Image: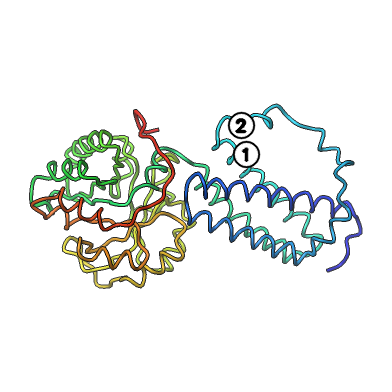
Amino acid sequence: MSPSPDPNLYRILDAAANRAREGLRVVEDYVRFHNNDANLARTLKELRHRLHDCLSRWRSDDWLPYRDTPGDVGTTISTVSEGERADLLVVVRANAKRVGEALRTLEEFGKVLDADIARDVERIRYEFYEVERQACSESWRHRRLRQSQLYLLLTAAGCKRPWDQVAQESLAAGVDVIQLREKELPPRELLARAEKLRQWTRDAGALLIVNDRPDVAVCVDADGVHVGQDDWPVDAARRVVGLERLVGLSTHNLDQLTAAQTSGADYLGVGPVFASGTKQFTNFAGLEYVAQAAKQATLPWFAIGGIDVDNVPQLVDAGATRVAVSGAVCRSDDPAGVVRALRARLPTMSVGPTDAPDSAD
């Protein structure tokens, strides 16, 4: 590395490095201690370590002799808003912006020292933007999603008893999320069914997701939409439902999961794990994929595919904490009993507090 011809370059880089490290730590502490989001906290820790590696390659310790805090004219410049933080989310949003700006400064001025290292910082910056989205787009829906462990895919044709009874009894027994999955219903009937489920899920403090119909999700004020690999692209669904609603994405292998992490999705389906009586698959991701997701997923994810009371322990052993079910509940004479049995076999999760809104925010 060639020495800088201008010592003030070191001052710029040193200040930016400090801002980036400090801001990353603030955001990490928020998602770790407030959100209890182990996956996002792990991602932030990895970004911090990668930044440290870049700074080490730049020999950032050589910048310290040029630090001149008393002579820094910027220390006397401040705005009223800097001294005001209305709540924790305002704090984390301000620090996230600080990180992005500091990384850009490091990237641009760092090109003078080593363009290859600057490109590595650029990659960190782009990855942080997705972390910022996840950490800062906090709504009741996102908080409720983190709490959720039991997700029911509801199709009337798959129910042994009337679908409305299955839905209401399952919600009363503790289902966290209901996905309305009706591919063949006429539009008016689909809308009417979604409106009923919207009221019931809201009364129960649960989430309502509509399968592959972002327009219906918006019309009934559902909490989000779920899409598959061959359905609406995540970014297109996001343009319809907006930032506040959730977008879920099905994944069937590690490559799809990796791509999904930066697709803008809020949560993932991981499977199919076992043979299912409600949907036919030629290939099964199996427990191996569940174990991979447990190690590498940074988004909330639900194991899915042929899950019932008997095989939940296998999923938990593989690292799953959330499951999505259909036939096990819908085809039962006692949906509520199955829901309670499933919940009893899932591990207790440590999650941040959330209060159900009067209406979804």
73 left or right, relative to 57: right
How crowded pointer 1 is (Cα within 10 Å; few <14, some 14-19, many 20+) is rated as some
Q: Which tag, 1 or 2, sits closer to the chain's start? A: 2
User: Where is residue 70, by image quadrant?
Assistant: top right
Asked if disc 1 and disc 2 are in contact, CB closer than 8 Å, the reply is yes
Could you tell me the amino acid type at mark 2?
Answer: Arg
Q: Which residue is mark 1?
A: 94
203 left or right, relative to 16: left
| Depth order, front residue of 343/56 | 343
The residue depicted at 33 percent of the width and 46 percent of the height is: 225
User: Where is residue 215, by image quadrant?
Assistant: top left
Distance between the Cα atoms at labels 1 and 2? Answer: 9 Å
| Depth order, front residue of 50/6 | 50
| Depth order, front residue of 34/279 | 34
In front: label 1 or label 2 = 2
For numbered disc 2, what is the local secondary structure?
A: loop
Asked if residue 185 is positioned above or below residue 41 in the image, the reply reads above
**How many marks on residues?**
2
**Marking on residue 304:** none
**Marking on residue 85:** 2
Where does residue 287 sit, x and y in percent of width and height? Answer: 32, 71
For the N terminus, the image quarter is: bottom right
